[in-house]
Image (cartoon, rainbow, N blue to C red):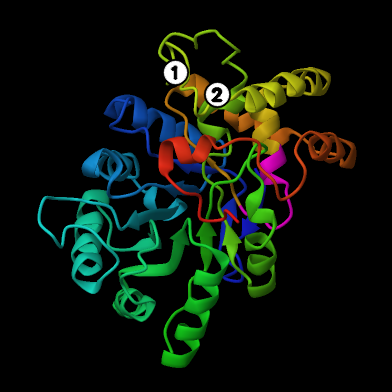
Amino acid sequence: MEYRSLGRTGAQVSMLCLGCMNFGWGTEEADAIAVIHRALDAGINFLDTANVYARGSSEQMTGKALTNGRRDRVFLATKVHGKMGEEPNDWGNHRFHIMRQCEESLKRLGTDHIDLYQIHRPQPSVPIDETLRALDDLVRQGKIRYIGTSTFAAWQLCESLWVSKELGLNRFACEQPPYHILDRRIERELIPFCQTYGFGIIPWSPLAGGLLTGKYRRGGTGPEGSRYEKGGPEQRFTEAALNIVDALRPIVEEKGCSMSQFALAWCARQPGVTSPIIGPRTMEQLEDNLKAAEIAITDEDRQKIDSLVKPGTHVSEYYEADFGPHPHRW
């Protein structure tokens, strides 16, 4: 397993990050623990979860998997922002919510500190200095080591750097954006920004929600137990996206790997990327994903992908179908 610096921090993380979103939302506890242990044995030391994943169950399962000395081997990341209850202050990027949810995440994870605490989504109605001050206090208290963001635009990160400098607060160390072969919009502005100012990049959805696994075909259904077993939504499985998937098949066959392995390897070896997040639901999916670390991406491979999807562009509005307006959309 290859290890890389998380931005300018110097902290070393594996080139693949194990995402724990499925734990509690399709993966039972025993299976989740087995997946985490196998990932650690394979050299992955970077785990990413969030308080909202299965309303805390993912964090609990992750914490149980890191007993018996395993916690010290792991760079553990979680997130805050989403709705965790029915009260008006049970979500958001304000101090009231952040301080409470950090304590709750620490309990669920069974640890005395979080290595990377990330703001799950931007919230323009809350001034960034409010958010950064709360996070800075948590760093000074020793409850978190580094802070980061997810799905922030470059201008929002630039604003955060200015506020951190003006007020003497800890700065964000990394950003977690959506990024994969079908959606390359972050190459326009976000990646150059992160490279310039020393932000790590931890892409989520590097397989486009399963579309880049190659298991879904035009007009057909997915494998039994898959997310889109009965067929994908028209908004995501657009004609343009499926055309690219079809064009990828001979490329990955020539490489002698699965489409998911190729897509992950391409993402992991793009300039500026630290660690794409894999999100296996089963041990079989994990084993497939792990092999991506062994695949070399050549200049010829990059040229083939660039000919299919031009740098800085995207293929379809698949993102908006599931998540709303894309933060890197111009």
Instruction: Please check the rendered image and state whether residue 199 is part of the magenta-colored stretch, yes or no.
Output: no
**Where does residue 245 sit, x and y in percent of width and height?**
68, 23
Residue drawn at point x = 47 percent, y = 30 percent = 280
Query: Which residue appears at 45% of the width and 41% of the height?
Result: 19
Residue 106 left/right relative to 292 = left
Tell me which corner region of the image, top left, top right, bottom left or bottom right, holds residue 218.
top right
The answer to whether residue 34 is above or below residue 223 is below
Which mark identifies residue 228? 1
Quarter-of-image position of residue 129: bottom left
* The stretch drawn in magenta includes residue 273: yes
| Image coordinates for residue 155, horizontal then vertical, percent | 55, 71
Quadrant of the rendered structure where residue 328 is?
bottom right
Task: Tell me where residue 156 appears, x and y as whole percent.
Answer: 49, 70
Contact flag, marks 1 and 2 (Cβ < 8 Å): yes
- The stretch in magenta equals 266-274
Q: Would you call the spot at circle 1 few (<14 residues within 10 Å), some (14-19), or many (20 or more)?
A: some
Q: Mark 1: which secondary structure?
A: loop
Q: Could one spot residue 228 in this view of the protein?
A: yes
Residue with the mark numbered 2 = 237
